[in-house]
Amino acid sequence: MMRSAFLIAGLLFAGSAVAQTPSADVTLWQGNRALGDVAKQVAFGARAPDTPGHQKTIDLITAEFRRLGIAVQEQQWNSTVAGQNHTLTNLVGRLYPKNPKRILLGTHYDSIIRAYRDKDHPDAVMPGANNSASGVALLLETARALHDAKAPPPVGIDFVFFDGEEGPLALGAGDPHWQPLGSPYFVQNIATFYPDTKPSQAVIFDMVCGSAQKLQQEQASLLYAADQVTKFWNIGRTFAPAFYSNTLTTAPIYDDQLALGEIKIPAFLVIGFDYEPWFNTTQDTPDKCSEAAINAVGRTLFRYIYLP
């Protein structure tokens, strides 16, 4: 698999006449713009369900997609878990809607409401620059880059922003009732968006701007989408080796890829999970992110979706 992936990539990026698929102009994907989106979201404050920042994030995503000519569909429902009722909203934007072969690119946009792991300020707002805002920024910038590309990739793209990934109490690992809410609901109602054919694969992004991140292949993803993981990491290690590891995560990471994988969509997670000492503290702020780090993920993705 590694050898064939490199061979295809070499043909495409060298502009070989053998390859008919247009190549990816990765200069269109600009990490500085993505970091601007991170800062905008952090400025909204807490973005847990039912907070003003949550709605402001929905408005930001919808406005940017509208500017790019991409219609956004809202999937809204009420969820009661552990005695708490929330109105939740998944957002779906479809690019190249007439292409029957589709890739789902997903992330969560809700944030943990308080920095429960902060030893000094556990009740303060958790800014969520990396753990929340970075995935949204990555998808927004990918949409912009595709919008500006001279030729479309060989697949249609569905951007899905999941709500409620941080669980019913929006406390992540601090919530004894934790479970993602948005991706299971999306899967239960997947015929709404895919009445005939499911997406050919799904890539989920979470925590992708940490300046010191070294991305490991996630164990559950290898069960669902081993070939796709190999292809993505081959590209990443070729073009941004400082940010991609040869090792696996020490354990499966429970995120939105699981619900999709369980219905036989090859789904994998790209996550910089080793984010200490800032993970879910008041220090998860934009200064912990870097343009090089988010470029390493965004430009890898951009190359990835242009490969057949």
Image: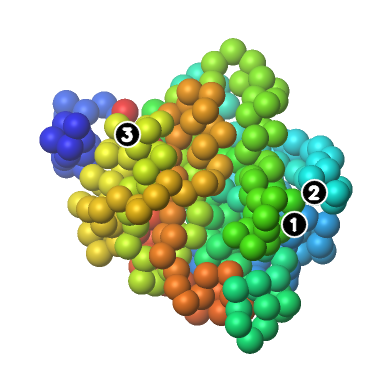
Within-10-Å neighbours for mark 2: few <14, some 14–19, many 20+: few
Position above or below: 150 against 115:
above
Residue drawn 42% across the image and 60% down it: 272
Describe the element under mark 1 as helix, strand or loop. Answer: loop
* Separation of marks 2 and 1 at Cα, in angstroms: 8 Å
Q: Nearer the viewer, mark 2 or mark 1?
A: 2
Mark linked to residue 169? 1
Determine contact: label 2, label 1, CB under 8 Å: yes
Mark linked to residue 82? 2
**Is 225 on the left-hand or right-hand side of 114?**
left
In which quadrant will I find the C terminus? top left
Among the two numbered marks 2 and 1 on one chain, the one whose residue lies closer to the N terminus? 2
Within-10-Å neighbours for mark 3: few <14, some 14–19, many 20+: some
Q: Position of residue 120 (x, y in %)?
A: 63, 86
In which quadrant will I find the N terminus? top left
Observer-nearest of 148 and 295: 295
Q: Position of residue 250 (x, y in %)?
A: 35, 53
> Which three-letter amino acid code belongs to the residue tagged 1?
Leu
* Separation of marks 1 and 3 at Cα, in angstroms: 33 Å
Number of numbered discs overlaid on the protein picture: 3
> Which three-letter amino acid code belongs to the residue tagged 3?
Ala
* Location of mark 3 (residue): 226
Mark linked to residue 204? none
